[in-house]
Image (cartoon, rainbow, N blue to C red):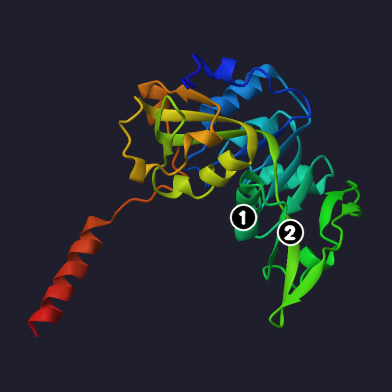
Amino acid sequence: MDKVVATAAEAVADIRDGSTLAVGGFGLSGVPTVLIEAVRARGVRALGVVSNNCGAMGTGLARLLADGAIARVTGSYIGGNKEFARQYLDGEIELELIPQGTLAERLRAGGAGIPAFYTPAGVGTLVAEGGLPWRYDGQGGVAVASPAKEVREFEGVPHVLERAIRTDFALVRAARGDRHGNLVFAKSARNFNPPAAMAGRITVAEVEELVEPGDIDPDHVQLPGIFVQRVVALTPGQAADKSVEKRTVRNEAKQDDAKDAAKRKAER
């Protein structure tokens, strides 16, 4: 039952060229950066990645992307990742863009043993009708386009058939985890880490705080250990190393003025 692995390198040692990975994280929150770096150190290529986005600001999956290690991405957001956009438009990488909620449910369904499901999201668009550019030819043309999907009506409302996602491996990050693989996530890190973990045939979790079985109240477990095969405990330095995507500075003078105005208005 003890699923703790000594190092991240050992935990990802069987990821090979062509492996498929479901990777947790939402923006820069909850990204399994230590496990991603361990995969990068292996030098594997032609990876198929399923993730909400493909990294940003030179961190997370953006590191594998810059190495040319990723062949295909299934996700819902490119964002400000200029290298991702360049590789996609130049025909170097294949991209399947799908609605964000559909992506989360396809991952969850894969872990729950549900082969496919119907959803109204995407009906009447290229998501259902086909023709989305999956891969460009590097000359501005489309080399591979998405196929049309089955559409069926339920109670008079059309729904599109979406297939579940299963991957060879899943890489996730949790705030707390025990030796049995039970996990707790911090805030928005919970958005995609649990469904990504469910979709992996072998799921590896890096945890910021490793605790003993029983230390996590069963009512507080957000992902049961049955979905996790390996646990890597982060060092305090690794746990604290978190990037900020958009840093803002508070203008205290303006805030004080606003508070004074609100106070005067209340007094009137």
Disc 2 crowd rating (10 Å Cα; few below 14, some 14-19, many 20+) is many
Label 1 and label 2: CA atoms lie apart by 9 Å
Could you tell me if residue 259 is visible in this image? yes
Place of residue 123 in the rendered image (x, y in percent of width and height, measured from the top left): 74, 72
Left or right, residue 95 beside residue 193:
right
Vertical arrangement, residue 239 with respect to residue 139, above or below: above
The secondary structure type at the circle numbered 2 is strand
| Quadrant hosting residue 214 | top left
Q: Quadrant of the C terminus?
A: bottom left
In which quarter of the view is residue 182 placed?
A: top left
Front-most of residues 266 and 51: 51
Q: Residue at x 47, y 43 (%)?
A: 29
Element under label 1? helix
Residue position for label 1: 105
Mark 2 or mark 1, which is nearer the start of the sequence? 1
Amino acid at the residue labelled 1: Glu
Looking at numbered disc 2 in the image, what kind of residue is underneath it? Answer: Glu
Q: Provide the residue designation for mark 2.
A: 162
Q: Is residue 132 above or below residue 247?
A: below
Q: Residue at x 44, y 42 (%)?
A: 244
Name the spot of residue 228 as percent of width and height, x first: 53, 32
